């Protein structure tokens, strides 16, 4: 897709509404999100439903929210994890599971990418770095 090229016509509100619905579904299912194909089928944008193609869901999501579907999901999960860690009541493993990460290593890597420190460092008091 060329820079500045619009995937969705501005008047195609039904497609825009479907992409917004996809975002709401992701938010409601952070612990166990659907695959991209499942998400397209749920919101009615897959070829099987006679709607948009999967590629259009990906590109429309990028256009509307300035990130990929996976990027959005990862961002929301790490924000939620940071909030849970800030409360200080749960272990890193518990926060990882509640945030939808089945593998603690993937959680730690995503958290460090977003915040620049590991979840353990965050818990041990280095979170003050984030505030400055």
Image (cartoon, grey):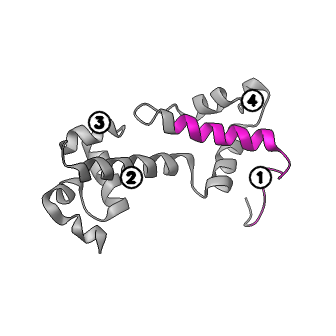
Mark 3, Cα crowd under 10 Å, few <14 / some 14-19 / many 20+, is some
How far across and how far down the image is residue 81, in percent?
32, 48
Q: Nearer the N terminus, badge 2 or badge 1?
A: 1
Gap between marks 3 and 2 measured at Cα: 14 Å
Label 3: which secondary element: helix
Gap between marks 2 and 4 measured at Cα: 33 Å
**Side of 73 where 125 appears, left or right:** left
Q: Nearer the viewer, residue 42 or 2?
A: 42
- List the residue tagged with mark 4: 47
Q: Nearer the viewer, residue 40 or 19?
A: 19
Is residue 57 covered in magenta? no
- List the residue tagged with mark 2: 79
Q: Is residue 84 above or below residue 18?
A: below
User: What stretch of residues is rendered in magenta?
Assistant: 4-26
Q: Nearer the N terminus, badge 3 or badge 2?
A: 2
- List the residue tagged with mark 3: 97
Label 2: which secondary element: helix
How far across and how far down the image is residue 47, in percent?
74, 29
Q: Quadrant of the N terminus?
A: bottom right
């Amino acid at each position: 897709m060329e820079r500045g090229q619009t995937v969705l016509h501005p008047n195609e509100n039904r497609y825009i509404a479907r992409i917004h619905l996809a975002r709401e579904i992701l938010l409601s299912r952070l612990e166990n999100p659907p695959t991209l194909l499942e998400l397209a089928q749920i919101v009615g944008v897959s070829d099987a439903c006679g709607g948009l193609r999967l590629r259009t869901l990906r590109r429309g999501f990028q256009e509307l929210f300035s990130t990929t579907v996976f990027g959005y999901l990862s961002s929301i999960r790490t924000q939620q994890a940071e909030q849970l860690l800030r409360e200080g009541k749960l272990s890193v493993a518990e926060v990882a599971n509640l945030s939808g990460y089945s593998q603690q290593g993937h959680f730690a890597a995503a958290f460090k990418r977003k915040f620049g420190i590991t979840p353990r460092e965050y818990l041990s008091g280095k979170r003050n770095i984030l505030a400055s």
